[in-house]
Image (cartoon, grey):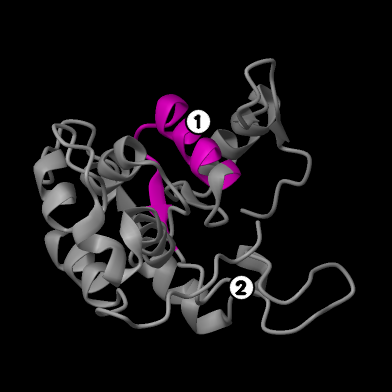
């Protein structure tokens, strides 16, 4: 249905939101063309906030994801430096795959647990706060960031990552993200820029 520049705002709470008139326009186009709304946002905090805004206001929207590896600038350009994260940097095949794989959110789904995030080295154990077992693997903060980047939800805290995983991702997708993490003593990829 097109790109809606100027469709977003940042209200008093500092979170990105969708302007009502833009969302009304998107919904009208969805009805007119009898097509579902598919949302695809950057793999960063603002993108996650906008996705949440759509989830609240259009619960039946389909959500497409592109990880940072596929949505980062490969070289310096007029508007963005190498490593800048944005869907505008993705290749056609990556965008096509993301849209073909788009899915509805399931707010009631509880497949993943905080205990699993602890076991996977994505958050520290609440009882001890000790994450030393994961330091040789890049540490829990980097591991969590890399899983979020892989899945296309960006850098999240533990609570946000768990919510995003339960809303959108299959066990296979999460397993692939975990399998992509650096092994013991391997270099941890730098964070891409937002």
Q: Residue at x 48, y 41 (%)?
A: 51
Q: Position of residue 94 (x, y in %)?
A: 48, 78
Tag 2, which secondary structure? Answer: loop
* Horizontal relation, residue 76 to residue 155: left or right: right
* Horizontal relation, residue 152 to residue 32: left or right: left
* Horizontal relation, residue 12 to residue 111: left or right: right
When the figure is inspected, residue 96 is found, relative to residue 133, above or below; the finding is: below
Residue 72 — which label?
2
Q: Is residue 148 magenta?
A: no
Find the magenta span and give its range. 46-65
Q: Residue at x 18, y 49 (%)?
A: 117
Q: Quadrant of residue 79?
A: bottom right
Could you give the CA–CA distance between mark 1 and mark 2, rounded to whole angstroms?
24 Å
Q: Quadrant of residue 84?
A: bottom right
Q: Main secondary structure of the magenta part?
A: helix
Q: Position of residue 74 (x, y in %)?
A: 67, 83
When the figure is inspected, residue 82 is found, relative to residue 36, above or below; the finding is: below
Q: Is residue 61 magenta?
A: yes
Q: Which residue is mark 1?
A: 53
């Amino acid at each position: 249905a097109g790109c809606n520049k100027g469709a977003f705002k940042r209200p008093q709470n500092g979170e990105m939101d969708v302007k009502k008139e833009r969302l009304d326009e998107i919904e009208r186009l969805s009805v007119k063309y009898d097509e579902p709304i598919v949302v695809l946002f950057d793999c960063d905090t603002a993108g996650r906030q906008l996705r949440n805004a759509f989830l609240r206001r259009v619960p039946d929207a389909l959500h497409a994801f592109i990880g940072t590896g596929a949505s980062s600038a490969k070289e310096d350009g007029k508007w963005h430096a190498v490593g800048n994260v944005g869907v505008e940097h993705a290749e056609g095949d990556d965008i096509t795959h993301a849209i073909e794989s788009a899915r509805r959110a399931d707010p009631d789904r509880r497949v993943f647990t905080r205990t699993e995030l602890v076991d996977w080295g994505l958050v520290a154990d609440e009882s001890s706060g000790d994450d030393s077992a994961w330091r040789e693997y890049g540490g829990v903060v980097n591991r969590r960031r890399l899983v979020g980047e892989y899945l296309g939800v960006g850098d999240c805290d533990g609570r946000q990552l768990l919510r995003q995983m339960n809303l959108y991702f299959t066990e296979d997708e999460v397993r692939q993200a975990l399998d992509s993490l650096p092994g013991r003593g391997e270099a941890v990829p730098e964070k891409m820029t937002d």
